[in-house]
Image (tube, rainbow, N blue to C red):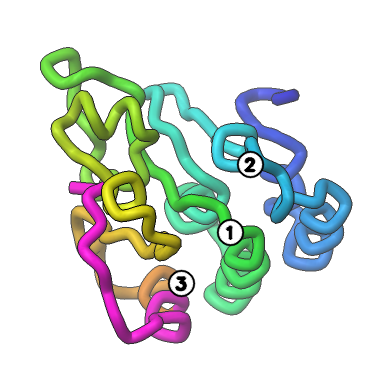
Amino acid sequence: MKYRGKTVLHYALESGPDVTGAMVEALNISRDTEKDERYLYVDRDGIHYSPDQYVRRIMTVHDEEGMDLLEILDKCDLTSRYYRNVRPGEGEQPEGWQGLPHPLCLLWGEVSAEYVYGSDDDEEEEHSEGDGDGINEQYDDEHSSGSETDSTYSR
């Protein structure tokens, strides 16, 4: 259920880490088999944001609070997604798109390593580096596994 395109998780994110942690636990997100679709936010331009991308790209939060929110979401094992649900030739993907659902991967000529190799590694490569500051870089630096895989979920 969504109100103004947001799920209860998005409202929890906007209320801070304590509320988000309680909501993640109450919703039992880590065990939800539909979590990657259920908790997407879609903006007016049709761009889909996973909760972590919502924090990174839409919310205005202090670095520490943003990092706390991302850490909570990281434990949910959600796929990081930022894309437009559009077919090639009918529109463009936003700069830095990532995490296309499998049917869109096929249409855009991409096949995920997860589908090809059955990999459990869900590290995804972003398409642009961004501005190099803020919670994105800090969180990524602190939580980097040290070994990047070439995921073709993103371009």
Q: Are marks 1 and 2 in contact (CB under 8 Å)?
A: yes
Q: Tell me residue 6's x, y (percent).
A: 65, 32
Q: Which residue is mark 3?
A: 135
The residue at the point 82 percent across, 67 percent down is 18
The residue at the point 26 percent across, 68 percent down is 149
Q: Tell me residue 42's x, y (percent).
A: 50, 29
Quadrant location of the N terminus in the rendered image? top right
Q: Which residue is mark 2?
A: 35
The residue at the point 42 percent across, 45 percent down is 81
Q: Nearer the viewer, mark 1 or mark 3?
A: 1
150 in magenta? yes
Q: Main secondary structure of the magenta part?
A: loop
* Helix, strand or loop for disc 1: loop
Q: Tell me residue 79's x, y (percent).
A: 48, 51
Q: Which residues are magenta?
A: 139-155
Above or below, 117 relative to 135: above
Q: Amino acid at mark 3?
A: Ile
Badge 2 local density, few (<14 within 10 Å), some, or many (20+)?
some
102 or 97: which is nearer to us?
102
Q: Which residue is mark 1?
A: 77
